[in-house]
Image: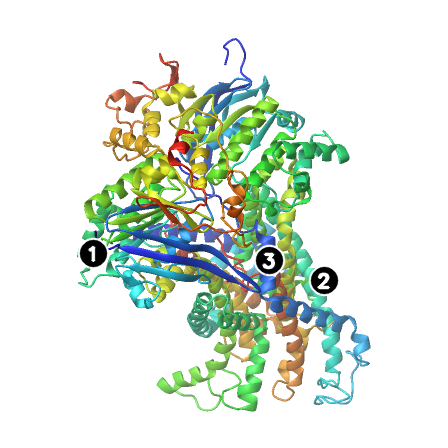
């Protein structure tokens, strides 16, 4: 990302809270799924967003594309605000921004043929109809490695990997600039995962796309990302270039994550185990104030950690880290 | 050398269909597990790894047909009476399943469910008090704080990681000789996965429990297992020491699988994807099951299925043209 | 656990209160909306002018509507449902007189139907897909589809008219009033057919829902885990699967209790059983609307209470519902 | 190499078209038999004038006659032909069943879809009302209402229809809620579909498979409800339904078995047929439809 250029996507102080209960006689409970998150994505960049289950990464993805409203904060894509968009503005937005979903089984309407599914955005956005639409559908399918004969078939006739290709074709058909991919390969078998990862990278090169790649698999994220952001309990705890983050993680949580991943090479794995032999068993507890990670943090020996939440700030290494004592 | 703890020969699992040949999901699977050994079975969905694991305790779906021999300490499991197999389940051989969220009965207390596992095989018929103490000890063993108090919790009051630990505690309650773990870490976060792997390793080291680990994750095998069995389309296609199989694979499928996994310790190069899809078990396929996806397949690969044959010390491969280990590693 | 349960019971009771109010309000507005003079409706056909005046005064019908409603509500809440025009007794007294017979009938039928229904449902689910399952399922569908009063009529034709084994109706033998143990025997003898009639509907319904819930429960991972622990099939079936399916069974019994009560009404008519249902019938035919609306409000209250109890029962069976 | 791999979930309803097919294939007998039974009763009611020459309301001198060639189902206390009364009674029972079911299914579908789709306070309010209606003893409510406002076909249809929608509403709401959170709905939204198109093209078709099931079960239940009202003497004597025939038969139960046996048989056959059909369509013996949670 060159500093002079404004980012294609800018996310500023986004919060998203969920209120549960609150019915008659039930207690209201507020969950801060996303809690004050800011970052930018440059045009042509792939930003990887990692975090454990419940870290709020998927919620953040849905807020960025405008499927969920933010409780507060702004998202702008190419200068256009996502938040307040309604009707026509929302459609204009979704011609530039699309999403690839996680579950190849639930992300396609079982009642519609592949043609119906892919024609939907063309019709709704007034892009093309009839023979023109068919031609575009064939092109999108072809770009995603599917034969034109797929058009007349229903989702249930395809395997998981093929369904994911259809989902990618659906996102691609409006020729967006920016695609949010929410765990696009986590439901797939290993050998199919590689096919889809390669496809996403080929499409990026062919169409000049920008990606937000949300995943829990640290190796996949390293493989596809230019830059990586790590999320923990609704907050960003560290962002850095992929190379830097994996080589020298600065936040204790990132360090713990990277330490925990086993490696397929038995010798490398034996090395890793030696290094982490003293790995503690953590007891996550809710923290009232202070750093969200401090209950699990091996370094949190200072009273400050329990009192004040550290902001995401530039660190000497070039990372941005939310920690009072990084490194 | 001691006798194997578990010895499987020519295991087959198939599902009969009306007016069609039955669907075979496991065929010709043979391997041994020595006392105290940790063996991993790795494969993708539909490879037959879970069915293989479940046939050891005869926990297959009702409609499944089992063939071949499964000997545990010399006794044929398929020939056991229902009572004999029940006595073995949870006592000599126990099992941990994939999803800790659904493996506990939601309406019973965690402690009572672990206690049930003990009481079912308790010849001494110890009292409630002794049972409670034993449950608390087991929960403490798997690293759950406040074990006596937590035993009174219901499953929905436990986090995913705690449930998987409690499940493990239940599985080892009677100090089994063999623990079968079916994707025990698949549903867990990576930090919790690391803890559960350490727990399994400790159990093996401290009590000598043999472990059969079923997983799709090669790294988990690398972390825990001395020996690995690779399955594809219901067959064992490679079987050998983890160090050898994962660094110098001899079967093209094993090699391709390793190539298609992104590595956390290496920057991104293009992945080598395996083309196509695994075969559908309902449609018969002649020859080697991998030949349609294999870059090196020859004519005979499509005509005749190779046997699992030895290719080194304790290493076997089911391929007409096994790869040269050194060359593959260099690639 | 007790305080939590107590809190839960209180909360459910609090939730049931608006429902009780709604029933009373509904009844009030129904009387007002019905064509004709409300006093005439409550006083029945061809009342004497004095009685009409008495009714008007009793219900405050000469006052504005909202005061009438407050008065009606106040009376209903204290169990004052007015006076039955036929028997000239307070409606509440008449109802309480008949209520035990209905409780005896429905209670017995429910206990028997629950036991057999659960056993059949479980047996069917355990052998899902087998011949026995198909037979039980088909039989329960047939039982579920038969109108209760017709079953009663057929049973009378068969066992009372043709075979002359059992009495066709009533609660006690017409001639000779027995006392003590003989009385119990006599009532039990008269109960066989009405209880059987009512139980057919209830039993088949419970069997159907229990089967569905058990099939689902038996498909869960925890059942496989229980088997892997070495639990016997019987233990897996009852301690694990049924413990979960029971929530559905209890819920269904609660939700369908209104149907059970309606079933009791027709069964009581067919067998001349002197309960609440018979009272409904008589009230309709004598155009005794005070009695009819009173009996309706009373039955609704019973249904609401039974639902509340079934809700609390579910919470006791399933810790996830205890909030 | 995973943090937590969310497992691929395949909700049952996604594969529903297949399961329904499989279920029908597994036991074709149930659904087909149900359809046949229903067809027979519908034909009987429609073709009544061709099946019997007798007038269901014409009095005769031959009272309480046993079944014979002249009167295959016998005659009642006023000498009316029971066969004719059963055939024409089917028109009344089936008619009331159909129209009430149309009201309750229409209402239930609408309320369920709206509550499930929009959620929030609207859902909360609608579901409280639905719950209240479901708990109340609907047949007793019907009895009180019809007694007070008077009997008659239209009143019966309205009362039964307006009291029977909660079951449908609850199931539809549950299904819509599940579908609402499927990823393909988010995908459709991002494909530019507005609320109306989302409901009409993406949600409704996935709920409609349930419409037929619900309709056949509701017709069965409405016919039963009508017979209950008639049996209590709240039917329309101008248009005798099967329930009314059974009420009249009750008086002569000990003398004339044919007065109750034949109308009851017709009623039971129809209800059984509709329930079989509903079960066959939903692909299970017992649809666990009314579970509250």
What's the chain of the residue with tag 1? B
Q: Secondary structure at mark 2?
A: helix
The residue singled out by tag 1 in the image is B131
| Image location of residue C230, percent across then percent down | 31, 61
Q: CA distance from mark 1 to mark 3?
A: 48 Å
Specify whether disc 1 shares its chain with disc 3.
Answer: no
- Left or right of C177 in this view: D276: right
The residue singled out by tag 3 in the image is D20
Specify whether disc 3 shares its chain with disc 2.
Answer: yes
Q: CA distance from mark 3 to mark 2?
A: 36 Å
Label 1 or label 3, whichever lies nearer to me, is: 3
Question: Image quadrant of residue C279?
Answer: bottom right
The residue singled out by tag 2 in the image is D154
Label 3 or label 2, whichever lies nearer to me, is: 3
C91 or D87, nearer to the observer: D87
Disc 3 and disc 2 in contact, CB within 8 angstroms: no
Q: Secondary structure at mark 3?
A: helix
- Left or right of C246 in this view: B287: right
Q: CA distance from mark 1 to mark 2?
A: 68 Å
Q: Secondary structure at mark 1?
A: helix
Disc 1 and disc 2 in contact, CB within 8 angstroms: no
The residue carrying pointer 1 sits among few (fewer than 14), some (14 to 19) or many (20 or more) residues within 10 Å by Cα, namely many
| Image location of residue B81, percent across then percent down | 32, 68
What's the chain of the residue with tag 2? D
The residue carrying pointer 2 sits among few (fewer than 14), some (14 to 19) or many (20 or more) residues within 10 Å by Cα, namely few
Label 1 or label 2, whichever lies nearer to me, is: 1
Taking D168 as reference, is B82 above or below it?
below
A11 or A51, nearer to the observer: A51
| Image location of residue A312, percent across then percent down | 39, 18
């Amino acid at each position: 990302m060159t500093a002079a250029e404004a980012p294609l996507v800018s996310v500023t102080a986004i919060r998203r809270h969920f209120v549960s209960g609150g019915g008659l006689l039930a207690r209201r409970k507020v969950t801060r799924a996303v809690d004050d998150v800011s970052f930018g994505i440059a045009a042509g960049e792939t930003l990887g967003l990692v975090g454990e289950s419940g870290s709020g990464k998927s919620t953040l993805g849905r807020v960025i594309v405008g499927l969920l409203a933010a409780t507060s904060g702004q998202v702008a894509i190419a200068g256009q605000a996502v938040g307040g968009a309604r009707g026509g503005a929302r459609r204009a937005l979704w011609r530039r921004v699309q999403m690839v979903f996680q579950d190849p089984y639930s992300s396609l309407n079982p009642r519609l043929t592949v043609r119906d599914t892919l024609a939907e955005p063309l019709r709704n956005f007034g892009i093309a109809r009839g023979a023109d639409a068919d031609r575009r559908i064939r092109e999108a399918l072809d770009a995603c490695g599917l034969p034109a004969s797929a058009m007349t078939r229903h989702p249930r006739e395809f395997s998981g990997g093929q369904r994911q290709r259809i989902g990618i074709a659906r996102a691609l058909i409006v020729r967006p600039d920016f695609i949010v991919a929410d765990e696009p390969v986590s439901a797939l078998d290993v050998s199919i995962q590689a096919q889809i990862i390669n496809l996403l990278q080929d499409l990026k090169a062919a169409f000049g796309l920008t990606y937000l790649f949300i995943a829990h698999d640290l190796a996949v994220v390293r493989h596809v990302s230019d830059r990586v952001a790590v999320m923990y309990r609704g907050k960003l705890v560290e962002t850095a270039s992929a190379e830097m983050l994996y080589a020298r993680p600065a936040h204790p949580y990132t360090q713990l994550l990277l330490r925990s991943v086993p490696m397929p090479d038995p010798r490398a794995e034996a090395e890793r185990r030696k290094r982490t032999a003293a790995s503690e068993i953590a007891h996550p507890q809710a923290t009232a104030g202070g750093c969200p990670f401090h209950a699990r943090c091996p370094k949190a020996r200072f009273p400050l950690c329990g009192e004040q939440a550290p902001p995401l700030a530039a660190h000497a290494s070039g990372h941005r880290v939310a920690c009072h004592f990084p490194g | 050398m001691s006798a194997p703890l578990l010895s499987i020969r020519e295991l087959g699992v198939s599902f009969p269909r009306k007016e069609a040949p039955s669907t075979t999901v496991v065929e010709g699977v043979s391997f041994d597990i020595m006392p105290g050994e940790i063996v991993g079975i790795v494969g993708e969905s539909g490879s037959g790894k879970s069915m293989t694991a479940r046939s050891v305790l005869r926990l297959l779906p009702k409609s499944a047909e089992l063939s071949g021999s499964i000997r545990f300490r010399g006794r044929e499991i398929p020939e056991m009476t229902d009572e004999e197999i029940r006595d073995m389940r949870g006592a000599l051989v126990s099992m941990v399943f994939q999803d800790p969220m659904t493996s506990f009965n939601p309406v019973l207390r965690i402690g009572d469910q672990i206690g049930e596992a003990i009481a079912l095989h308790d010849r001494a018929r110890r009292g409630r008090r002794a049972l409670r103490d034993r449950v608390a000890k087991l929960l403490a063993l798997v690293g759950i704080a406040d074990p006596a108090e937590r035993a009174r919790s219901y499953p929905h009051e436990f986090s995913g990681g705690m449930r998987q630990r409690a499940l493990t505690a239940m599985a080892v309650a009677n100090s089994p000789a063999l623990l079968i773990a079916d994707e025990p870490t698949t549903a867990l976060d990576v930090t919790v996965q690391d803890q559960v792997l350490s727990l399994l390793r400790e159990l093996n080291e401290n009590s000598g429990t043999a472990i059969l680990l079923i997983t799709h994750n090669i790294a988990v095998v690398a972390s825990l297992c001395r020996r690995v069995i690779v399955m594809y389309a219901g067959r064992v296609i490679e079987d050998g020491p983890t160090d050898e199989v994962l660094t110098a694979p001899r079967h093209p499928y094993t090699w391709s699988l390793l190539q298609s996994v992104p590595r956390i310790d290496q920057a991104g190069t293009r992945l080598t994807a395996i083309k196509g899809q695994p075969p559908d078990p309902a449609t018969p396929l002649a020859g080697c099951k991998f030949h349609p996806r294999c870059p090196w397949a020859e004519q005979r690969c499509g005509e005749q299925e190779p046997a699992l044959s030895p290719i080194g010390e304790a290493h076997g491969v089911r391929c007409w043209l096994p790869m040269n280990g050194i060359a593959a590693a260099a690639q | 656990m007790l305080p939590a349960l107590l809190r839960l019971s209180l909360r459910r009771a609090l939730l049931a209160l608006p429902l009780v109010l709604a029933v009373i309000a509904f009844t009030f507005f129904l009387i007002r909306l019905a064509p004709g003079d409300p006093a005439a409706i409550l006083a029945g056909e061809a009342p004497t002018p004095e009685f009409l005046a008495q009714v008007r005064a009793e219900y405050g019908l000469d006052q504005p509507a909202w005061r009438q409603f407050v008065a009606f509500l106040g009376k209903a809440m204290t169990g004052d449902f007015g006076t039955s025009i036929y028997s000239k007794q307070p409606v509440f007294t008449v109802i309480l007189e008949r209520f035990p017979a209905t409780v005896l009938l429905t209670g017995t039928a429910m206990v028997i139907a629950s036991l057999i229904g659960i056993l059949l449902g479980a047996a069917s689910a355990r052998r899902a897909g087998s011949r026995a399952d198909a037979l039980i399922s088909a039989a329960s569908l047939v039982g579920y589809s038969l109108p209760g009063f017709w079953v009663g009529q057929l049973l009378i034709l068969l066992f009372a008219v043709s075979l002359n084994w059992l009495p066709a109706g009533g609660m006690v033998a017409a001639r000779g009033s027995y006392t003590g143990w003989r009385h119990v025997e006599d009532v039990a003898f008269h109960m066989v057919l009405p209880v059987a009639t009512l139980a057919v509907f209830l039993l088949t319904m419970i069997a159907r829902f229990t089967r569905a819930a058990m099939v689902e429960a038996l498909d869960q991972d925890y059942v496989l885990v229980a088997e892997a622990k070495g639990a016997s099939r019987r233990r897996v079936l009852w301690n694990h699967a049924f413990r979960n399916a029971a929530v559905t069974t209890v819920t269904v019994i609660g939700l369908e209790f209104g149907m059970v009560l309606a079933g009791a009404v027709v069964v009581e008519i067919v067998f001349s059983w002197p309960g609440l249902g018979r009272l409904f019938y008589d009230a309709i035919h004598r155009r005794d609307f005070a009695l009819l609306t009173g009996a309706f409000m009373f039955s609704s209250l019973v249904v609401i209470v039974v639902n509340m109890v079934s809700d609390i029962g579910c919470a006791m069976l399933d810790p996830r519902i205890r909030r | 190499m995973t943090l937590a791999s969310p497992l691929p979930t395949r909700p049952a309803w996604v594969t529903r078209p297949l399961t329904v097919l499989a279920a029908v294939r597994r036991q074709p007998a149930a659904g087909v038999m149900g359809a046949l039974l229903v067809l027979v009763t519908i034909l009987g009611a429609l073709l009544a004038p061709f099946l019997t020459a007798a007038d269901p309301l014409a009095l005769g001198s031959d009272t309480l006659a046993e079944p014979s060639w002249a009167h295959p189902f016998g005659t009642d206390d006023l000498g009316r032909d029971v066969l004719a009364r059963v055939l024409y009674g089917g028109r009344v029972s089936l008619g009331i069943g159909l129209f009430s079911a149309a009201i309750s299914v229409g209402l239930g579908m609408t309320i369920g879809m709206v509550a499930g789709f929009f959620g929030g306070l609207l859902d909360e309010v609608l579901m409280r009302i639905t719950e209240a209606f479901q708990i109340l003893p609907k047949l007793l409510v019907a009895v009180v209402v019809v007694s007070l406002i008077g009997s008659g076909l239209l009143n019966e249809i309205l009362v039964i229809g307006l009291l029977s929608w909660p079951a449908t509403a609850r199931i539809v709401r549950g299904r819509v809620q599940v579908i609402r959170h499927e990823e393909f709905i988010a995908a459709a939204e991002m494909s530019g579909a507005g609320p109306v198109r989302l409901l009409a093209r993406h949600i409704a078709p996935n709920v409609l498979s349930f419409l037929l099931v619900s309709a056949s079960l509701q017709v069965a239940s409405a016919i039963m409800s009508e017979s209950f009202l008639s049996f209590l003497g709240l039917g329309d004597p101008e248009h005798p339904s099967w329930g009314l025939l059974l009420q009249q038969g009750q008086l002569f139960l000990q003398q004339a078995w044919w007065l109750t046996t034949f109308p009851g048989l017709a009623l039971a056959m129809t209800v059984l047929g509709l329930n079989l059909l509903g079960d066959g369509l939903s692909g299970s013996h017992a649809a666990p439809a009314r579970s509250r949670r």
